Image (cartoon, rainbow, N blue to C red):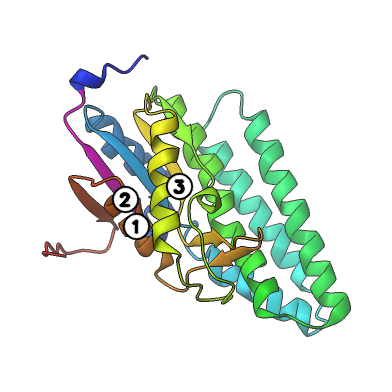
Amino acid sequence: MIIDRDEIDSMEVLKFGVSSLASAEAMQRVRDVLVARRTKQRIVVCSAMGGVTNSIISLGLKAANGDAGYAEDLEALRRRHIQTLDDLQIEEAAEVRQELQDRFDRLESLCKGVCLLEELSAKSMDQLVSFGERLAVPIVCAWLEKAGLQVRRVDARDWIVTCDQYGAAEVHQSETFERIRKGVDADNSFETLITEGFIGRTPTGETTTLGRGGSDYTASLIASAVQADFLEKSTDVPGLLTADP
């Protein structure tokens, strides 16, 4: 589908948290929301699937303590993501499956290194937990493409520039805003642009995280940079809050 820019009402930023991406059923609701609102061009910021960040933290801690049981937990995490992909019945999912496997192979290598050293630095932890969002986005992207949306995908680390305070990195806002604007303008024919929340990169290329709630921060940075009409955070927790930011 080719986007007619004259038919786009506005730009909006939507952030889907862990509960909104907890399962195939939850992702189906995300699809329904985005398809119903496809007349609005939007940037979607995704968290990890529900519980995944905590599971990865547990992997790292077990590995650092020399507990080989981390391998079984890692395999369970891999099966969960592959099962979600299967439950969504995405045709031609081989490429997504391979991407997930490559990332789990990298995650396994990192855990083995931590286990051998019996040391888990803040820098290594950021490397580990960054995989939560980086595993969710390929699935969400393929799912939305199946629904017929024109999807563009961006690695958030190419946009979010931070210091090297691992675990709670501070954002270099002016450079980040410039990268976001240039990144969007480089190809703005999308209906939905998908990226990760929570993660960034130092000027020297090291992966960082923005701390708990970091996906909300990512979404707010993007909304401010592109002067979005509004930022919406979606969750399946009962209740509604509208506020002047």
- Left or right, 93 with reference to 30: right
As drawn, the label of residue 124 is none
Magenta segment's dominant SS is strand
Mark 2 lies on residue? 225
Residue 122 falls in image quadrant = bottom right
Left/right of residue 7 with respect to residue 168 in the rendered view = left
Which stretch did the figure color magenta? Answer: 8-16
Q: Which residue is mark 3?
A: 179
User: Mark 2: which secondary structure?
Assistant: helix
Identify the mark nearer the N-term, 2 or 3.
3
Residues tagged 2 and 1 counted as in contact (Cβ below 8 A): yes
Q: What residue is pinned by disc 1?
A: 221
Above or below residue 58? Residue 146 is above
Pointer 2 local density, CA inside 10 Å: few below 14, some 14–19, many at least 20: some
Q: Residue at x 45, y 39 (%)?
A: 183
- Which quadrant of the view contains residue 131? bottom right
Q: Can residue 199 be seen?
A: yes
Q: Is residue 118 above or below residue 113?
A: below
Q: How many marks?
A: 3
Separation of marks 2 and 3 at Cα, in angstroms: 9 Å
Amino acid type at image mark 1? Leu
